[in-house]
Image (spheres, rainbow, N blue to C red):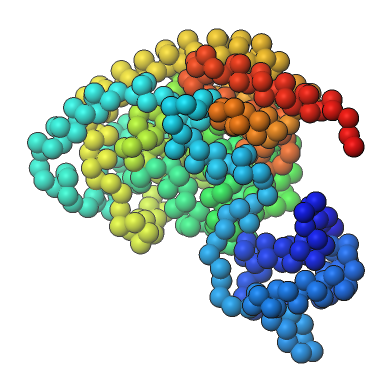
Amino acid sequence: MKTLPSSNRSLVETVAGAITDRIDSRQLMPGARLPSVRAFAEAMGVSKSTVVEAYDRLGAEGAIVARRGSGFYVAGKTRPLCLKAVGPQLDRAVDPLWITRQSMQAGPDLVMPGSGWLPSSWMPDEAIRRGLRQLARGPATNLVSHDQPLGFPPLRAQIARRLAEKGVEAGADQVVLVDSATQALDLLCRFLLEPGDTVLVDDPCYFNYHGLLRAQRARVVGVSMTPNGPDLAALAAHLAEHRPRFYVINSALQNPTGSTLAPTITHRILKLAEAHDTLIIEDDIFGDFEGKPSLRLAGFDGLERVIQIGSFSKTLSAAIRCGFIALREDWVEPLIDLKLAMSLGNSHLSASLMHALLTDGTYRRHLAEVREKLGRAMAPALRRLEGCGLTAWLEPSGGFFLWMRLPDGIDSADVARRALALGLVLAPGGAFSPSSLGNSFLRFNVAQCTDPRLIPMLEAALNECVAARSEPVG
């Protein structure tokens, strides 16, 4: 594919950069043969002399070596993985990993409707302090020991009971504790994938899926979304064409759209997965925000083809690192071996604390309060954003995300860049989409939309975008 240089890069630098990017993303490994001068010149749409000069530069830098009569080859050892090189090249201000960093280290002066978590003031800090004091008075093993390979048995039993309330039948010995839902997905990728395997994700989906799957050398293919779940025709076509190893999906209150699978869609997804021998990883991290549980793929399937993951990071505390994997019995033993090889287990202290908060009623009371707060926050946030000219793709039944369409012709990345200069951290839709489907959307967290500075800042960023479009060119 022809690649044109940017305004500040020469043709030679562009060609050399294309090779360097392939090496950094490990598309070209040490010892791999580079395309011939003629072939690469045709692919890039440049002259052969340009490619020769680019190869000479890379050879002088030690990145490639020439072998007489054979061609050019990648030199040296494998470079450390650079996720920026593996994925699409986005402006740093709208790169999903940068958005996460910015949200995590933001000070009080930044307004963060693009963040993916609840405000700290909404969390039950006093109950958590009380639980920690109780653990400190208990046996020393709670504070200093490794956990069991599967994880703290009382918490696994409690999670199994909670799964049953959502229609998912799993014994406690089918529940493997981990430190987060992200670790759960990483562990399952290592367990199930080979480099080059295809994985389906929703388009749009949680942007961290993209980085994690790229780190596992998987090929990511997006399935376009509807308000009731994935587009079934698109899903069927991708299953038939790509033969993916698995499909990652949120059944309830999907991130970023807030959608929940309709019952008929749930059934059809399972039938299609069975017909194409594809596994499903059901990420249920937002499921507890539902007032009444919707249907779960794992409930219909009985954990035969579906693996369910979850954690308490979004609902209770990101500092209590505690998640789980529920899966078929014959996969538990090899998965535990892999878990121990990677981390020597999960946090026993976090698991013990989480169990205490589940069993003393703290978690139930906290969830009821949070669901009420989110219910009160959703409509006002929607009205204020619509007043800025944005349109809701869907009004969710719960949770805290709104997927808002920008006025025609405005790109979410442009808005995000301009908003950032004003102290407003947004979540541009392109970060959530492996295609271009999300470019005209922004994700908003209604729990973070109460700051009175939000709307003036957002309007200013939008007005700048409109003004820039109307400026004469040249």
Q: Give the vertical position of 148 relative to 56 (above or below).
A: above
Residue 169 in which image quadrant: top left
Q: Say if residue 92 shows up in the picture.
A: yes
Q: Give the vertical position of 273 relative to 127 (above or below).
A: below
The answer to which of 355 and 452 lies nearer the viewer is 452
Count of numbered circles on the image: 0
Give the x, y percent position of residue 214. 59, 54
The answer to which of 83 and 392 lies nearer the viewer is 83
Give the x, y percent position of residue 83. 58, 54
Please give left or right for residue 419 compared with residue 134 in the image: right
Q: Residue at x 73, y 87 (%)?
A: 67
Q: Residue at x 55, y 9 (%)?
A: 380
Which of the image's four quarters has the C terminus?
Answer: top right
Give the x, y percent position of residue 101. 49, 41
Residue 104 in which image quadrant: top left
Please give left or right for residue 183 compared with residue 85 in the image: left
Q: Residue at x 71, y 46 (%)?
A: 238
Question: Quick one: which residue is furthest to the front in this view?
Answer: 474
Which of the image's four quarters has the N terminus?
Answer: bottom right
The answer to which of 338 and 140 lies nearer the viewer is 140
Q: Say if residue 256 shows up in the picture.
A: no
Residue 471 in which image quadrant: top right
Q: Give the vertical position of 94 relative to 186 (above or below).
A: above
Q: Residue at x 41, y 24 (%)?
A: 119
Give the x, y percent position of residue 6. 79, 52
Please give left or right for residue 4 compared with residue 439 in the image: right
The answer to which of 61 and 211 lies nearer the viewer is 61
